[in-house]
Structure formats: structure tokens, C-alpha cells
Image (cartoon, grey):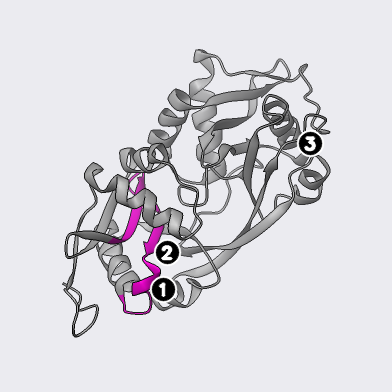
Amino acid sequence: MIDAAADAPAVVLIPFGSGHITEAVALSSGLGWPYRDADWRFALSLGRGIAAVQDGRLVATGFWWPYGEGFASCGMVIVDPRLQGRGIGAAIMDRVLADIGDRTVILNSTREGQRLYTRLGFVPYGQVRQHQAVLAADSAAEPDLAVVRDMAAGDAAAVRSLDRAAARMDRGDLLGALFTTGSVVVLDRGNGVEGYACVRDFGRGVVIGPVVAGGDDDAKALIAALAARHRGTFVRIDVTGNSGLSPWLETIGLPGVDGVVAMVRGTLPAPATATRLFALSNQSLG
């Protein structure tokens, strides 16, 4: 229990369940986060959540997602603005980290959250840049259909292998969900799959990501193929700070709107190949 204030009911931490989703949508909307009911359900289906409840009302959340035995991602840490500054976020993170155990943990932090995460042992290791807009009908994104095609069932093993090399962790459950709920394209010059990208419904429209490729031009080809299919739609993409894609995204009609700091508690292994993660699934899931 957390004593939110001397004259207020205590805040209790319990497992987050599907019954909390309607209130969670309202909670995230209150902070300007465009998560839909389906987005909360997608997150819950892949991970584990903590709900902070006061007098029967959801007032805060926190989630984590296991990636193999050694890694996890953490996110969707939200506290009702009326109760911020009272230690609820810290209590949720303590519970989340206790659940995670010895895994290496990654998260993406706003400027406001960095102090808390630093106190909990997280250190910065990169940046993420958010780009989004309603993509114009005359967007400059022109796909190269000679090298980009829709993913086939036989490509799944290659896509999983590429993702594991780029993300440096086993995100098999996430990929399985993306294969089911999203549309995936692959880069194939006739010598096998060299990269992939996914698009799915999210927030105000669609989100492009993850994007995994061996170089900038390949990543651009994958993104352009998906962007071209969603002209006139609200499109979001969260690219890594070292992707080098932000100037190009501006030229195709996706301006940068925000940025967060990528942080880790533990040690991420060094990349094993030149294959890189250019864009995240979203900021919480990584």
C-alpha cells in the first residue's frame, strides 16, 4: 500500500488485468497519449502489468515485457497527474523491477522520468526520435518494388533471425503478434531476406516499426514501401538516434515531433552483425 496523502485512501498495487483497460485508456488520454483500447490489449497480451488503484479507481500503471530469459523492456508507466510527485511511479517501478529480476532491462524515458530511472540504476545508451503526421497524398516516399515485397510464410525464420541480431535479444513473442496483427514487408534482392519492416494500427492511425536492415538505403526502401500504402493516413515512426533517418523522414512528410532517451539497467551485448534496428515497434515495447 502507498499512502498517497494523509487524508486520502491508500493506493494499492495489484496485477493489471483486462478489466482495467477502459480506465487505462482514459488515464493515457489524459496525458495526451493516443493509446486505444486495442493498444492496451496488445500490450497486455505480450507482457505483465501493475495497476495502482485508489478507492477502486485506476490511478497509475506500469508494464514490462520479457524478451527471452535474459532481457526485458519496460514502459507504459503512467500516473494520474493529480497524484504525481507522491512516489506512486517509484513504487510501481520497484514492483516491476522486482518482477523482472536479474534480466537486463531497456526503456525509453521522457525528460521528466530520467531522474527516477537514474536513481533505479538505468543509464542512457541512445536516443529515439518520434516522427509523425498525416502523410500527404503526394508524399515523396517512392517504394522500390524491385527489392521490397510482402513477407511470405517461409520468411518467418529469416525475419526472426534478423531481429534477434539487430535487437540483441529474443523478441519472438512480439514478432509472432506483429505477424498476426500487422503487415510485414521484406527486402529481398534474390539472395534471401536482408531486412524487414512492419506496419500496424496504433494510436491515431498506424505505426511503422520495427524496421531492421543492414544499411540506411535498405531501411529507407522498407519504410517507403509501407508509407506509400498509407498516404492520407496518420503515420508514426520512432527511429533510433543513430539511424540517420530523421532528415529523410522530414523530406517524405514525416516531421520530428518529440524525442526520448533510451536507457538500460544491465548490459546490452555488442551487435553481432551489421544488421541494425532503425525503428522501434513503439517506444514502450522497443
Report the disc number at residue 266: 2
Q: Compare marks 2 and 1 and give the one earlier in the sequence.
A: 1
Report the residue marked by disc 1.
121
Does 240 sit above or below residue 204? Answer: below
Percent x, y of residue 51: 25, 57
Answer with the quarter of the image where residue 75 lies.
Answer: bottom left
Q: Between 66 and 270, which is closer to the camera in this rendering? A: 66
Q: Amino acid at mark 2?
A: Gly
Report the residue marked by disc 3.
217
Say if residue 71 shows up in the picture.
Answer: no
Does 23 sit above or below residue 139? Answer: below
Specify start and end residues of the magenta stretch as a single range.
59-87
* Callouts 2 and 1 close, C-beta under 8 Å: no
Q: Compare marks 2 and 3 and give the one earlier in the sequence.
A: 3
**In what element is the residue under mark 3?**
helix
Instruction: Determine the CA span between mark 2 and mark 1.
Output: 8 Å
Residue placed at 40% from the left, 70% from the top? 81
Q: Is residue 241 magenta?
A: no
**In what element is the residue under mark 1?**
loop
Q: Between 16 and 219, which is closer to the camera in this rendering? A: 16
Q: Residue lying farthest bottom?
A: 6
Query: Which image quarter is the N terminus in?
Result: bottom left
Instruction: Determine the CA span between mark 2 and mark 3.
Output: 32 Å
Count neighbours of disc 1 (C-alpha within 10 A) and say few if under 14, some if 14 to 19, many if 20 or more.
few
Q: Amino acid at mark 3?
A: Asp
Closer to the observer: label 2 or label 3? 3
Residue placed at 69% from the left, 37% from the top? 214
Q: Amino acid at mark 1?
A: Gly
Residue placed at 28% from the left, 71% from the top? 91
Instruction: Determine the CA span between mark 3 and mark 1.
Output: 36 Å
